[in-house]
Each structure stands twice: as structure tokens, then as C-alpha cells.
Image (cartoon, grey):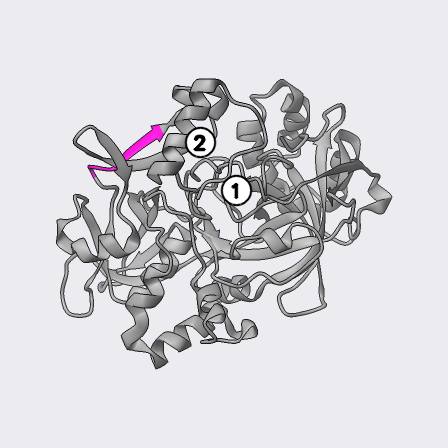
Amino acid sequence: MIHFPARRYAPGASLLLSLLILAGCAHEPPAPGKVDNIPQQTSGPCPNCAPAAKPVAPRVPAALPSADAAPGGAELSNWGAVEGWNEDDPAAAAPALQISCSVLARQPAWKSACDAALALGPRPSANATRQFFEQHFVPWRLTNADHSPDGLITGYYEPVIKGSRTRAGAYAWPIHGRPDDMLTIELGDIYPELKPLRLRGRLVGNKVLPYWSREELTQKQDRIPAKVLLWASDPIDLFFLQVQGSGRVELPDGKTVRIGYADQNGYPYQSIGRWLVARGELPLEKASMDGIKRWVQDNPGRLPELLNANPSYVFFRELPPSDDGPLGALGVPLSAGRSIAVDPRYVPLGAPVFLSTTRPLSNAPLRRLMLAQDTGSAIKGAVRADFFWGLGPQAGAEAGRMRQQGKMWLLLPRGVTPPKGQ
């Protein structure tokens, strides 16, 4: 079910929304780049968070406004109040900032700061980078609605799975491209006030019906009007690839193929970890990606039931070979350990953010200058971030364990004020 913002729409738009709700055609896009964990109760936005780790999408689908999204805001701060500012090496984030500036510099408010960032060169010193930020930027402490500063910090990554160009033996699980018969309707093209909203469906006669759910697509098998890009060897690995939204497929000859998010069937993401916990199949503390995989090994006959608990289904596209990270919502490659996904209602895409949190399952400080280069429908609220750990199993292990408390400072050019969270 879609949640509409508390605002008035034109009469025609209201009627259209009512019809869409009755038809069941409008759905929230999935959370790009998330490991399937269960949210813990925390201060701030966390009780409303969807599962951690969303698909890392080259283009993240437009997030729909949510009436239950945790609100928040930003309070003017100072550099002395930024926890760990003098501990991190900000020069390590300079390349990611310069990548962000390839987009941000088009905005007049960012041009001066971005020109100065590019002037730092490819290998600036820590002191030069710190002085650059203190001269050109102002820190704003991000807060929840009650002005508390702590929120949920989760992790995501780029997976590598086994696959083949041809269907043979264990390679029996299709990785689909975008279906030819799936419609994507941008409601903002009809009513500008609905610009963030879109729906996906299929045309039956003169009616637009919801597109097929995961269970229906699985039942249709070879009758899905979509190209099979590759064949995966493991259905649960493919599922988590869909959850992440992009990754790499290792072929039998050792070569790898990069694939990225192409589209999604329009159904909201449902956490299979939460599904297992709700049914008493797993305790909360074991509802991680590894815990889910172990449950599947012990209950192979229930795999279809488990996967179909999440009606969302992601379609992919093949990407050119590259050593860069996956593309985030900003349209630039993500940098392992320096990119985060945020709620763009509170944090402008591309902006630097100083993050003060702890390492996964640890009290060891993780205080680092980050770049807000991605988004996801699971990331709601001002004090909420998803930490991109990078490529492969080790990154996946870190991402799967990361559910930490954290504080965030939004760094904006002097004279620029934070978004109001509308």
C-alpha cells in the first residue's frame, strides 16, 4: 500500500489517487542496497526503518513519500562539536568529494566550493583537506523530530555470485532483464504535484493492472516476456543480489559480468528476515543474511515460501566492465568506505556528511567523512544512513552485521541552508 504525504492535491489528482489505491496499482519501490536484517528499536527514525541493506542501483527508483517516515531536521553546529573531526583523515574522502562535484558544480550554490575541492588535486594532505572544509563548509547537526541526535546506521555492499551465460546443471535460476510488457507510469507527467510518484503495471484490455508479483513471476517461468541475461547457480544468492540491486556474476571460466538495477515490479520490499522472526523460525539476533542462509540449508523445501514472502522482484541490465564501484542515486560510482545512502529530503545528494558511529558488533569508533551518493526507500529520516562497504563476501559480512547507533553532521557550503524535509 502506498502512503501519501499529508498535503492537498488537485481534485482530479485526488480522484486518480483513489482509483489507484482501489486498483492496487501503486507500490513503493524496493530499498536499493540492503542486507536483509531486522531493525532494532532505537531513538529517532529506526522503528520505522525497512530492512537494512537495499539494492545498490545505478539509478535508484524515485522514493515515494511516506506518511510514517521519521521526520527530523538540522541544527547549526560548529567544527569543535563534530565528534571525531580531527581523528579522521579527510583527504581519503577527497576523491569521492571530487566525484560528487562532477554533479554538484552545476548548481550555483555549490560551484565555488567544488572549484576549491577540485583545486586540491588528486592527493591532498590531511591538513590541507581539513582546512579546505573549515574554510568553505559549515557543519549542521542532523536531528530527529525530538531533537535527539542518534539514529540507525546500517550497511550495504556489492555482491559477487556464481552464474553462467547458458542454462545448464546448477545454473538454473534466471536473472531477468526488464520485461517488455511492464508499464512505468510517471504520475508527475499528469499532475506535477505527484512528481515523486510512479506506478508499474501491465495493460489488460483498456485497464492497467498491477504487474506480476514475485510468486506469479516464478510460476510463469519461461513465459516472462523478458530477456534472461544470465543463469545463477543459487536461488538465495540471486535473491540477495536482487536485494542489493547490483553486483557481479562470476562465470565458469573465471570472467565476471557486472549487472545493475534496471527496474522493479512495483511491489514494496518485504523483509524475509522479519518474516522468519514473526513466525518463530529465527530469533531476532540470528535474522541476518548468514542466519537466513543457514535456515534455508536446514529447510530447503520451504525456500519458495520464504522467497515469495517478498513480492518485490528486481530486473537487471548488463553493465560495461569496470573496476569502479556501482552507480548510486547521484549517478556516480560509489566509493567503498566513503559513500553512504541517505534520505534526500534532509541530506542533499552529493553532499559531504561527517558520520560518528561504531564498527559492526563493536564499540570501536568509526568516525569518518562520507559522501551522500545514494538513496533507498528503507532510508527514512534525517539521522539515518546506509554505509557502503564495497565489493565481495567480506564487505557483505560487514554490511550484514552493521546495525549501529550514530550521529551525523551535514556539511554545506557557507550560505547554503539544509533542506526542510518536505
Q: Indicate which label's residue lies in the foreground, 2 or 1.
A: 2
- State the extent of the magenta-drawn residues as a range: 180-185
What's the amino acid at mark 2? Leu
Instruction: Report the residue at 54% width, 40% height from top.
Output: 66
Residue 174 quadrant: bottom left
Question: Which numbered disc covers residue 375?
Answer: 1
Please say whether residue 398 is one of the residues in the magenta stretch.
Answer: no
Please say whether residue 184 is one of the residues in the magenta stretch.
Answer: yes
Q: Do the residues under discs 2 and 1 have CB atoms within 8 angstroms?
A: no
Q: CA separation, marks 2 and 1? A: 16 Å
Residue 392 quadrant: bottom left
Could you tell me if residue 265 is visible in this image?
yes
The residue pinned by badge 2 equals 197
Residue at the extreme right of the image, as rendered: 80
What's the amino acid at mark 1? Thr
Instruction: Report the residue at 20% width, 28% height from top.
Output: 206
Q: Quadrant of the N terminus?
A: top left
Left/right of residue 6 with respect to residue 79 in the rendered view: left
Label 1: which secondary element: loop
Where in the figure is residue 52, as x and y percent of width and height?
A: 53, 57
Q: Name the foreground residue: 389 vs 320.
A: 389
